[in-house]
Image (tube, rainbow, N blue to C red):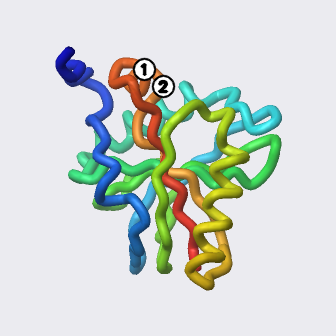
Amino acid sequence: MGEQAETGCCKRFDPAPWQEKEVTWQDKLFLKDHVRSFLHIPLNMDQVMTRDLKLIEDAKAFGSEQLMLSDEKSLWGSDIYISVVKEVPGATMEKISGTFLTKVFEGPFKNIGSWIKEMKAYMSSKGKEIKKLYFGYTTCPACAKAYGKNYVVLLAQV
């Protein structure tokens, strides 16, 4: 059976460029927002994403790279970062700098605990400690279902 047709929403994700790589950013620009959660389950993600994507589209700030990071900083909320190529009026902007080791995981979000353990072991094998951990969500849930793969990239700042 052939590959699923493109959805017209999220691009199909290629894990190869992100699997066990070192990435360095200097003032990489992101639109920053906050999502309310209950035990890490997002409650208002649809509304936040709809608002943010419209702001980015109106500003013509989408780049060729499709990247959304999440900082799961508490059980009750997370900060999200959407990569953009220029300032977006009406949005909070943040620049992220640093060196990150990456690892790609595939499967349901319920596996996130084991992914974090595996990422910590990977970092330890490299003699590194995690300063900050971001989760890179590669597609929306509908596109993950359509493509048959739910990829998540863990980015560990060293």
Name the residue rendered at 45%, 40% in the picture. 151
Disc 1 and disc 2: Cα gap in Å?
6 Å
Which residue bears the numbered disc 1? 145
Q: Residue furthest top?
A: 1
Residue hosting label 2: 141
In the image, 38: left or right of 21? Answer: right
Above or below, comparing residue 113 to residue 125 in the picture:
above
Q: Are marks 1 and 2 in contact (CB under 8 Å)?
A: yes
Dot 1: what SS?
helix
The residue shown at (56%, 52%) is: 135
Q: Position of residue 146 (x, y in %)?
A: 35, 18
Q: Which mark is residue 89?
A: none
- Residue 19 location (% of width, % of height): 39, 59
Figure quadrant of residue 130: bottom right
Eye-nearest disc, 1 or 2: 1
- Label 2 is placed on what type of residue? Pro
Name above or below for residue 140 compared with residue 28: above
Q: Residue at x 35, y 44 (%)?
A: 56
The three-letter amino acid code for the residue at tag 1 is Lys
Q: Residue at x 41, y 35 (%)?
A: 139
Quadrant of the snapshot with the N terminus: top left
Residue closer to the observer: 50 or 37: 37
Label 2 element class: helix
